[in-house]
Image (tube, rainbow, N blue to C red):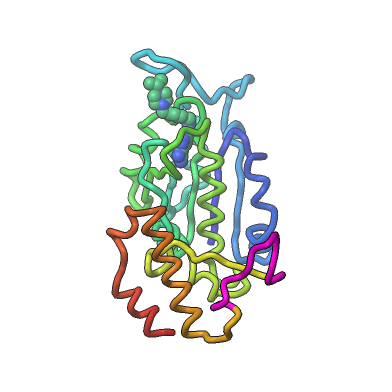
């Protein structure tokens, strides 16, 4: 998979040189290219923004500079992803679908956002899909943090990136849509607290049922919205697997 990220702060994406994503890049599993939007400016001040039509606070990113940049990195079949506070929520299911694609391009806006004609222009281009997404209901100063989230959420799903693929199955927001159960390791006693006895029992069936019960309790307590969307069939399949 190839992912291009375009930003006026390319150094914001430096963490993607680290850990599993960094290894995926050096191992050839992920072709990640980070670009400085200002490389496509033509004026001496390398201007990327201007005042908003209709007035209002702040500045808007110019469509011409973005158009030159995206024409340079987009190819047929690419999926243009634009982080924005008004975007569709980025979910695990979205990450799974994106991980199946060949070429993603992430356009990181700043200021008050990118001129709306940019997304409109590329939506009209045959062979290019455009998706505006948000990583949560809070306000950030730009799209770079969202790009980091998206790249990590997608890259970890690529074959060979995560050492034990099984760990991708029992995850929060996993197949059954449950939050993850609590995890423990040595020492068995710490700060006067014990590990639940069932986890020391060696009885795999009981352990699996305890974990599922804990996941259900957590989901009901912390994310009642997910309970309504629970995939009960997947839950039953998970039960049968124990
Ligand atoms: C004046 C007044 C009435 N306006 C009312 C609406 N406000 C909305 C507004 C606020 C901030 C930004 C800054 N910004 C620029 C590009 C950009 C990309 C993503 C995000 C972003 N924020 N939060 C997320 N989950 C995001 C994602 N994904 C933020 C971005 C852009 C837009 C702006 C102020």
Image: 179 above or below 106: below
In the picture, residue 226 is in which quadrant?
A: bottom left
The residue lying toward the viewer, choosing from 200 and 106, is 200
Asked whether 53 or 241 is in front, the reply is: 241
At a point 39% along the width and 78% down the height, the residue shown is 238
Q: Position of residue 206 (x, y in %)?
A: 47, 82
Q: In this picture, which residue range is highlighted in magenta?
A: 186-199
Above or below residue 165? Residue 172 is above
Report the residue that reaches farthest toward the front: 192
The image position of residue 53, as x and y in percent, is: 37, 17
Residue 165 screen position, x and y as percent? 55, 74
| Residue drawn at point x = 35 percent, y = 74 percent | 235
In-front residue for pair 52/56: 56
Camera sees residue 67:
no
Horizontal and vertical percent for residue 134?
Answer: 42, 43
Residue drawn at x 58%, y 67% is 183
Q: Quadrant of residue 5?
A: top right
| Ligand 1 placement by image quarter | top left
20 versus 17 height, above or below: below
Residue 200 falls inside the magenta stretch: no
| Number of residue marks | 0
Indicate left or right for 138 with 202 as reference.
Answer: left
Q: Looking at the image, which is closer to me, 152 or 36?
A: 152
Looking at the figure, which quarter contains the C terminus?
A: bottom left
Q: Quick check: 230 left or right of 46? A: left
In this view of the protein, can residue 174 be seen by the observer? yes
* In this rendering, position of residue 176 left or right of residue 140: left
Residue farthest toward the top in the current orientation of the protein: 55
In percent of the image, x 33 and y 50: which residue is there?
Answer: 126
């Amino acid at each position: 998979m190839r992912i291009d990220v375009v930003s006026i702060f390319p150094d914001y994406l430096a963490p993607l040189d680290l850990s599993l994503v960094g290894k995926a890049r050096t191992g050839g599993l992920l072709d990640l290219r980070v670009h400085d939007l200002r490389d496509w400016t033509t004026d001496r001040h390398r201007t990327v923004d201007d005042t908003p039509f209709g007035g209002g606070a702040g500045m808007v990113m110019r469509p011409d500079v973005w158009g030159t940049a995206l024409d340079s990195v987009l190819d047929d079949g690419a999926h243009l992803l634009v982080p924005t506070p008004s975007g569709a929520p980025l979910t695990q299911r979205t990450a799974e679908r994106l991980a199946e694609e060949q070429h993603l391009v992430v356009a990181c806006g700043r200021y008050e956002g990118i001129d709306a004609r940019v997304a409109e222009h590329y939506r009209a281009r045959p062979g290019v899909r455009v998706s505006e997404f948000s990583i949560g209901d809070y306000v950030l100063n730009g799209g770079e943090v969202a790009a980091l989230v998206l790249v990590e959420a997608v890259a970890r799903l690529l074959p060979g990136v995560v050492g034990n693929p099984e760990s991708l199955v029992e995850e929060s927001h996993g197949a059954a849509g449950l939050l993850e159960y609590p995890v423990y390791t040595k020492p068995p006693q710490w700060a006067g607290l014990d590990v639940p006895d069932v986890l020391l029992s060696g009885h795999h069936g009981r352990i699996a049922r305890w974990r599922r019960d804990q996941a259900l309790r957590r989901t009901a307590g912390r994310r009642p919205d997910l309970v309504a969307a629970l995939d009960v069939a997947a839950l039953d399949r998970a039960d049968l697997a124990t």
